[in-house]
Amino acid sequence: MSSEVKTYSLAEIKAHNTNKSSWIVIHNNIYDVTEFLNEHPGGEEVLLEQAGKEATEAFEDVGHSTDAREMMKKFKVGELIESERKQVPVKKEPDWSTEQKDENSLKSWIVPLILGLLATIIYRFYFTQ
């Protein structure tokens, strides 16, 4: 069994742009999403629109979940040839740590409270004389 990854050019991928054969390039990896067209939560049109071309930016703009990224692995058929690869920065996943949440929720009620108190003091000072 060969562990060598197959490589394809953009010209080869361009031919796979129909609902009978849909390939997309995401982060220089090539995925055959033909079998996934009917299952895609956004509808098959979304995938067909990107079929046969580089779709990294469109993929990242949507903000796919970790589960979606994991699911992609089974559709990988190869990689883009070295000469056609692009450096595409991977968007950083948000950090939903509880420490950050607590800090933000504290700010979300203390700041308005202080502003309200200041407004009350200023109002009373100027309008009760």
Image (cartoon, rainbow, N blue to C red):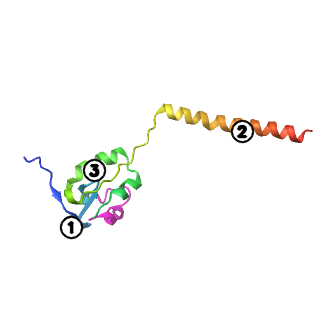
Residue 77 lies, in percent from the top left, at 19, 54
> What type is the residue that disc 3 sits on?
Met
Q: Nearer the viewer, mark 3 or mark 1?
A: 1
Residue 67 lies, in percent from the top left, at 34, 45
Quarter-of-image position of residue 79: bottom left
Task: Mark 1: give few (<14), some (14-19) or many (20+) Cα within 10 Å.
Answer: few
> What type is the residue that disc 1 sits on?
Ala
Looking at the image, is mark 2 or mark 3 earlier in the sequence? 3
Label 2 with label 3: CB-CB less than 8 Å: no
| Circle 1 SS class | helix
Quarter-of-image position of residue 128: top right
Q: Is residue 127 visible?
A: yes
Task: Mark 2: give few (<14), some (14-19) or many (20+) Cα within 10 Å.
Answer: few
Residue 115: which numbered mark, if any? 2
Q: Work out which quarter of the rendered image holds the C terminus and state it.
A: top right
> What type is the residue that disc 2 sits on?
Leu
Residue 11: which numbered mark, if any? 1
| Numbered range of the magenta stretch | 36-52
Q: Which residue is under mark 3?
A: 72
Decide which of 40, 13 is in the foreground and name it. Answer: 13
